[in-house]
Image (cartoon, rainbow, N blue to C red):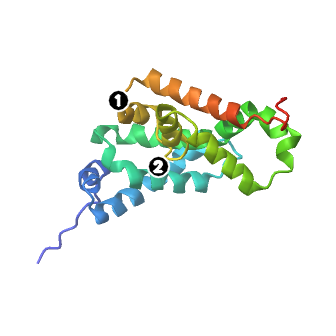
Amino acid sequence: MTATTSSPLTAAQLLPAARNGDAMAMEQLLRLTRPDIRRYALRHCAATTATDDVVQEALIIIYRRVGALREVAAFGGWVVRIVQRLCMRPVLTWLKAESLAQVDNHLAWSHRPDHELRHDLALAIDSLPPKYRDALLMRDFEELTIEEIAQRLGVTREAAKSRLHRARALVREYLAPTDRTGAT
């Protein structure tokens, strides 16, 4: 009797089954990809970024979105871009906070309970025209890329970026504190 030894499957071999919902293939793909993700995170993230958190988030994104990957050959580059984006998240958060510094530093906001601020933000988002609201929700809540937003909305990449920029400006304008007499 001869024992057959099966060599481990590669990502290229696992991807088609994982994209079609095969749970075992997905599990093997994530296990196989984890060391590469960790290596990418160590290379691309700043020392202050929690590498383990980036690895976990990347695995979750791969799990959720692998079905949307069009080309098996693009998998490696896609994973690198996911890690790079996750590594940039703290910087982007800081930049967004800087652009909202006027709102954040205003005394009117410092005494407001969190539930009121959340309510005001929900009202601000709800007040947006649908084309701006959709772009904002897709980017900031669904965490879609600009390309994914453009595809879903049926517009160009530039139009999607413009809508997102305008949506954020309108939300900032809505949230800009004013005293009750109408003066800013």
Amino acid on which disc 2 is placed? Asp
Task: Tell me the CA gap for discs 2 and 1.
Answer: 34 Å
Please say whether residue 148 is visible from this viewpoint.
Answer: yes
Q: Residue furthest left?
A: 1
Q: How busy is the neighbourhood of tag 1: few (under 14 within 10 Å), some, or many (20 plus)?
A: few
Q: How busy is the neighbourhood of tag 2: few (under 14 within 10 Å), some, or many (20 plus)?
A: some
In the picture provided, is 28 more to the left or to the right than 134? left
Q: Residue furthest bottom?
A: 1
Q: At numbered mark 2, what does the secondary structure look like: helix, strand or loop? A: helix
Q: Which residue is the site of mark 1?
A: 154
Which badge, 2 or 1, comes first in the chain's sequence?
Answer: 2
Q: Which residue is the site of mark 2?
A: 36
Viewer-proximal residue, 77 or 21?
A: 21
Q: Residue at x 45, y 22 (%)?
A: 159
Q: Residue at x 40, y 30 (%)?
A: 150
Residue 34 marker = none
Provide residue 88's location: percent of width, then percent of height: 61, 38
Provide residue 164's location: percent of width, then percent of height: 54, 30
